[in-house]
Structures are given as structure tokens and as C-alpha cells.
Amino acid sequence: MAAVRAGVVGAGFIGPVHVEALRRIGVDVVGFVEVSESLAQARKSAMGDGKIYESLEALLADPTIDLVHITSPNHLHYAQCKAVLEAGKNVLCEKPLAMNIKESAELVELAKKTGLVAAVNFNVRYYPLAHEAQARIQKGELGELVAVHGSYLQDWLLYPTDWSWRLERQFSGSMRAIADIGSHWLDLITFITGLRIESVMADFKTLHKTRKKPTGPIATYATADPNATEDYPIDTEDYASVLIRFEGGARGVVTASQLCAGRKNQLTFEIDGSEEALAWNSTVPNELWIGHRNRPNEILIKDPGLLSPEARDITSYPGGHNEGFPDTFKHLYRDVDHAMKNPGAPTKYPTFADGHYELLIGEAIYLSATTDRWVRLDEIKVG
């Protein structure tokens, strides 16, 4: 297969991140779609000055495009992914894959039927030391896994004047902190440990029950004009904590919040085993803490000469040369690119099935939070 040619749907905060990473691995980003011509023109430079398509249909009608990246708001993902697959093109979708498990289950089946590459953008898996943690657990170095705990914390919605479309249920879904950032933590932990979740107990809190919604459009992470707002009722969570029971007996807990002053974008985890423990912090992504009982603890610095083959495969630079957030996208898209060019090769990227599983966990968490009880994942049924 020749060099992959891609189109992007959505030019908000994350769209240019996709474009930059695609171009780093040699994918030709042909163009993009936005909701209006004026917004597309305003974002044209950020999107790499590609062609502006008037609609998704026009993009899909371009026979030169092999791959479509969906970076639009959540409520559009299902219909857009379905249209892309039915047009015979490969697709990578931002999380969440859909608004509910009925939609995501349909997309999983459609992806199987078409045989096309269908990926979800769980990029946090692609830090080298996340792969290193997975390799050490698979080798049994931690012993029996006992407990997993951590958090995903941000502060960009701390004030009632902070605003995003993610605050509106009709666009983002019934959850926010868990769906927006907690889903990355849950995917990362299930990827690293291989553990499946048996049941959950969740506690939600909405601090700002009314926020100041801008009367005009505003970009993610931007500050609204306080003189051009209106009161808007909020019914999604600012804060969530979830107790987790894993199959096999391990226990876990995660906190997700977008109200933590000073925490710009911090994901942490600790995985405790009967022999060793591992801990990692996304704001110091090139260090993996290794805990011991009877000898000094260690800090493993990301260095391809010290890493397992699995982690070395997604490490681009020598020790002492840090890699971070943008590199995770590059390595994910490299796996997608490889899959497109090598049909039948083992699947390494997060699939639509992974996206469906995260939505299944999310629906169990939401049911738990709204009924104040433990909820087993096998209670959640499609439809």
C-alpha cells in the first residue's frame, strides 16, 4: 500500500494534535471538515492548511482518502464512524466511541463485517513506560496483583465561568469527568494489568450546579467574556470516585476531577503486587517508580537500552531525551498505519471493541452513582 492519505473531521483543540502526529509518521493529511465555512477558515492554519471539505459526505466521496480521523463532539461519533465504515474507509475515532453501548456494539459489528481498521484514540497507552509496566506484569515480576489506585485530575473547569460543550449533556453524554478523562485511566489500567472489571461503586459530585455559558462560541481551555454569558444548569459530575472489584480478586479505586487547582493534566496510577509495585505520573512521564519490600526502591528512567522490547518499540529517542504527550499520538497512529499496510498482522492499536468495553464500564459506573449501590458489569445489557 502506498502512503496513507487521511481526512480529519473536527478542528477543535484535539484536531490539530491528530494532524501534527499523522504528518510526523508520513501520512498525507489531505483536508478536514468543520461545521461552517467560517470556522473552517479560522482553523485552516492550525489544521495544516489542508483542503476544506464542505461536508463529511464530500470528504468520503474523495477516492484518494484511505483513513478518516473523527475529532468532533461526542454526540456525532456514532453516526460519523458508521458513515466512514460504510464508505469503505478506515477510521480512528476520539473517545467515547459512541453515546451508549447499543451504538458502540453496532459499530463493533460493522467494523468486523467490513474488515477495515477501526481504532479508538486511547493514546495514553502509548507512553513507553506504560508499555514497560505492562511487560513487567506479563512476566510476573509483580507477583499476584492486589490493588490498583490512582487519579486523573485537571483544573480547567474549576470556576463557574469556565465553559465547554462538554458541559452540555446533549453533546457529551450523561457523564463528564468519568467519560472525558476517567475513561483514559480505566483503559490504561485494563491495558497494563490485563484485569477485567467485575463490579463498581461510584460517587459523583457536581460542585457548580449553575455555570456561566458564553452567548457566543468558545474554544476548549479558553476564557469566556464574563459580560457575554447566561446562566446554564449543570447536571453532569465535576468530581467522581469509583471503587473497583476486578475479576480474580484485586481491588481498585480511581478519582477523576476537573476541579483540582494546579493540576493541569495529571494521570497517576500505582499497581501493587505481592512481590513488587509500580507507580507512574503523566506529568513526569519518563520515570517509572518500582517499589520493593526488602531492598531500596528504584526509579527507571525511560531509556531504550533499559526497557523491555515492547516498550523499546514505541521509544523514539535515547535516554535523557524526554518523550511526552504528542509522541503518544504518533506511536498510536504508527500502529494504525502498519495495520492498514499489513492486513492480517496482529492488532496492536485500541480497537472499537476496546471503545465498547469502556462504554460498558461507564454505564455501570453511571448506574452505580445514580442508584447508590454496587453494580456488576454483567448487569449492563445492550438495549
Image (tube, grey):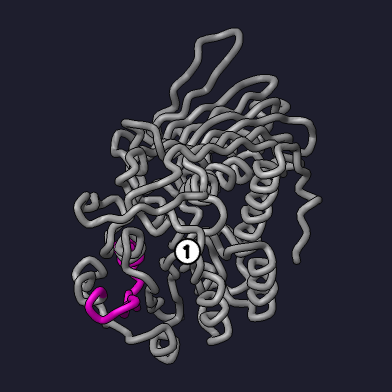
Q: Which residues are magenta?
A: 20-39
Q: Inspect the magenta stretch and tell me whether residue 323 lies in it.
A: no
Q: Which residue is mark 1?
A: 171
Q: Is residue 382 above or below residue 112?
A: above
Q: Reply yes or no: does residue 36 show up in magenta.
A: yes
x, y percent for residue 316:
36, 48
Q: Give percent across and percent down for residue 257.
A: 46, 38
Question: Which residue is at 78% across, 39% downward?
Answer: 247
User: Dividing the picture into quarters, in which one does residue 286 lie?
Assistant: top left
> Does residue 313 appear anywhere in the picture?
no
Horizontal side of residue 244 vs 226, given as left or right = right
Identify whether 106 is placed above or below 96: below
Q: Residue at x 59, y 39 (%)?
A: 135
The residue at the point 62 percent across, 21 percent down is 276
Camera-side residue of 280 and 45: 45
Q: Count neighbours of disc 1 (C-alpha within 10 A) and say few if under 14, some if 14 to 19, many if 20 or more.
A: some
Residue 255: image location, x then y, percent: 53, 34
Looking at this view, is 301 or 377 the one in front? 377
Residue 177 in view of the camera: yes
Which residue is rendered at x = 66% and y = 24% of the image? 273
Which quarter of the rendered picture does the C terminus lie within?
bottom right
102 vs 81, left or right, is right
Nearest the camera: 303 or 83?
83
Q: Is residue 73 above or below residue 248?
A: below
SS of the residue at dot 1? helix
**Residue with the most extreme top position:** 294
* Amino acid marked by disc 1: Phe
Q: Position of residue 196 (x, y in %)?
A: 72, 44
In the picture, measured across the screen, residue 222 lies left or right of residue 6, that is left
